[in-house]
Image: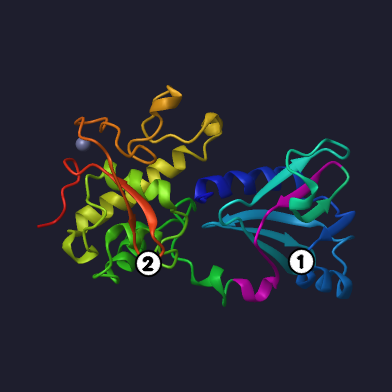
Amino acid sequence: MPEGDTIHRAARALHTALAGQRIERFESVFAHLTRVDADQPIAGRHVQRVEARGKHLLMWLDDDLVLRTHMRMHGSWHIYRPGERWQRPRHELRILIETQPYVAVAFAVPVAEFVPAGTIEHEGVVAELGPDLLSDTFDTTEACARLAARPDTAIADALLDQRALAGIGNVFKSEALFAARVSPFAPVASLAPEQLARIVTTAVRQMRANVADTAAAGRTTTNRLDPSARLWVYGRGGQPCRRCGTPIQRAKQGPDARSTYWCERCQPRPS
Ligand SMILES: [Zn+2]
């Protein structure tokens, strides 16, 4: 699943391609989008800007309309030159936005809606998001307070709660906890404030490194160039820990049974 780093990179690419451009054509398979288009045509508007909030991608259009999309498991935005061959099949098209220089296509995106710009900051899922780890104004203290407000939740599940802090998915959840040497099963209340802060700042550092231009080669938390050594624990069940050699564990965790990877020796469970 795309995490905050992927969405921020997509938003930046879409912003570079589309900001300031006039929309020549709009197309969607979603009836709730085409209904808005029929009432208040999307073609003819300009794209003002594109930005990421946590894992949501927001495209701001003229006349205070925002297109919000969420990729979930398999969705992605692509940018093409007009006439260029697409890398995903036509039947996966959900939204198409054509400008003179570029065509932006959302493939297999399951969540999309038009929201008035005036309400997006005040109600709904975007308004409820916790501090975005990749935002320039990210507030560690606020993020830690929101985590601490979930004392009985296992830290791995709390990190995935987008209302506590926004942008972390399964990969950075496991990677940040390994780097901070904290068990994914530790209840938030069992962690000292310094530990919580270390987990959060570690996640911020790891994710920021993966939105940088140099991150194009693929996601990494180990900073190793070897493609087989890019991550500490995620996806490495049964393989030796890169620190101590103990086999990495894998389990389904939390209400959504999300995969967690950890080293039992480097990240001992709280007693
Ligand atoms: Zn280990």
In the image, the segment drawn in magenta is: 101-120
Snapshot quadrant of residue 30: bottom right
Query: Residue 113 colored magenta?
Result: yes
Snapshot quadrant of residue 209: top left
Is the CB of mark 2 within 8 Å of ligand 1? Answer: no
Residue 56 spot, x, y in % from top left: 58, 59
Q: Residues within 10 Å of mark 1 (few under 14, many from 20)?
A: some
Residue 108, compared with residue 62, is above or below; it is above
Label disc, if present, on residue 30 of the rendered structure: 1
- Is 62 in front, or is 167? 167
Instruction: Residue at 80% x, 54% y: name it.
Output: 96
Quarter occupied by the C terminus: bottom left
Snapshot quadrant of residue 187: bottom left
User: Which image quadrant shows ligand 1?
Assistant: top left
Query: Is label 2 in a helix, a strand or a loop?
Result: loop
Chain-order first, disc 2 or disc 1: 1
Residue 251, compared with residue 241, is above or below; it is below
